[in-house]
Amino acid sequence: MMLACASAISAAMSDAPKHTPLVFSGMQPTNTLHLGNYLGALKNWVKLQDTMPCIYCVVDMHAITAWQDPKELVRSTREVTAAYIAAGVDPARSILFNQSQVSAHAELAWVFNCVARIGWLNRMTQFKDKAGKNRENASVGLFVYPNLMAADILAYRATHVPVGEDQKQHLELSRDIAQKFNLDFGAPDFFPLPEPVIVGPGTRVMSLRDGTKKMSKSDESDNSRINLTDDADTIAQKIRKARTDPEPLPDSKDGLKGRAEAENLINIYAALADHSPETVIGQFAGAQFSVFKNALADLAVEKLTPIAGEMRALLADPAEIDRVLKSGSERALAIAAPVMAEVRRLVGFVG
Ligand code: TYM
């Protein structure tokens, strides 16, 4: 059914007026953000502000799909907000808010719980990874998490979603949900099919301890990641300790085959420097890792420590952070309210 419908809807979409370009993305306030969050998403968010209106959300409702200490959630929500601003998200230009303050997210997620199919969610690899062997004991929220993510985006009818590669499958599901809603309720162009924006060499930053594992907030080893709050010495030390192999750096991209750790460090350098990996390989061809790691440590310290400093300054005034979030929530609600009124009408809710 999905496939036949999909082509019908794509045909209808091509005749329909285009949706107004709008960016939406978010991060979970669980633990401190790391280099993967920065290079895979945040750095691109900042650039996109020059091309389209943007909405950036701290997804606190997603965070509680695994239990969070409430005090820690408050702290972490403010810290992630500070990280967005310190990295260059401008709360005057872009809308910056926390998810729980706009009830449209929860409301639309319920409608999407009734649109999405259990079979679709059963295919989500992140649920399988996060639930692990003890699946029966995972929260129901963790299972329907991608429906909430679709609601986040579609409550604003956002068209572009900048994320790291690990979110690709969830965005494909968002597109399926949008298509099925449009079809089920006879509103061919109501929701846009949001486009993933997964660009640059930092879309999948790997652990510094194991080049086959994604850099992650939940890795037991703090040496596996660079946190956005790390100071210069810690950053340099983690890079110097990063796992590598005994060979010097290659002179072409082909030479990185089977060398996951080397490839990861080159990609990190390229993403931080805003160069292509090929340029970085050209620059360091034949160099020993000790030389390359020193250059990478200097670059990472130069790019990341101002963000940590600015975060500290912002966090010294939590009331100001709360004001930014509140004003962002009001602006977000103003966009979501008419969309939700139309959703209620389309679904047949009297009111
Ligand atoms: P989250 O909080 O796990 O991650 C936030 C962003 O960081 C990216 N990312 C990475 N990129 C490159 N390398 C890595 N090692 C790495 N680790 C994380 C993620 O791809 C993401 O872009 N479900 C989402 C949050 C979310 C969302 C949304 C995103 C909720 N609703 C709507 C977009 C639109 C999540 O858990 O991201």
Image: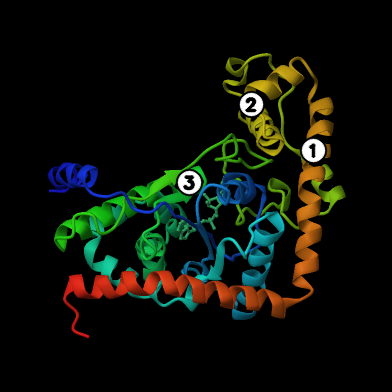
Q: Is residue 13 left or right of residue 103?
A: left
Observer-nearest of 253 and 256:
253
Q: Is mark 2 within 8 Å of ligand 1?
A: no
Whole-Å distance between the Cαs marked 3 and 1?
25 Å
Circle 2 is placed at which residue position?
A: 277
Q: Residue furthest front?
A: 17
Q: Residue at x 19, y 55 (%)?
A: 188
Circle 1 is placed at which residue position?
A: 299
- Point out which mark residue 63 bears: none
The percent coordinates of residue 348 (x first, y second) are: 16, 76
Whole-Å distance between the Cαs marked 3 and 2?
20 Å
Q: Is residue 35 left or right of residue 112?
A: right
- Point out which mark residue 166 bears: 3
- Choose the circle earlier in sequence order: 3 or 2: 3
The secondary structure type at the circle numbered 2 is helix
Residue 116 visible to the viewer: yes
The percent coordinates of residue 291 (x first, y second) are: 84, 26
Whole-Å distance between the Cαs marked 2 and 1?
15 Å
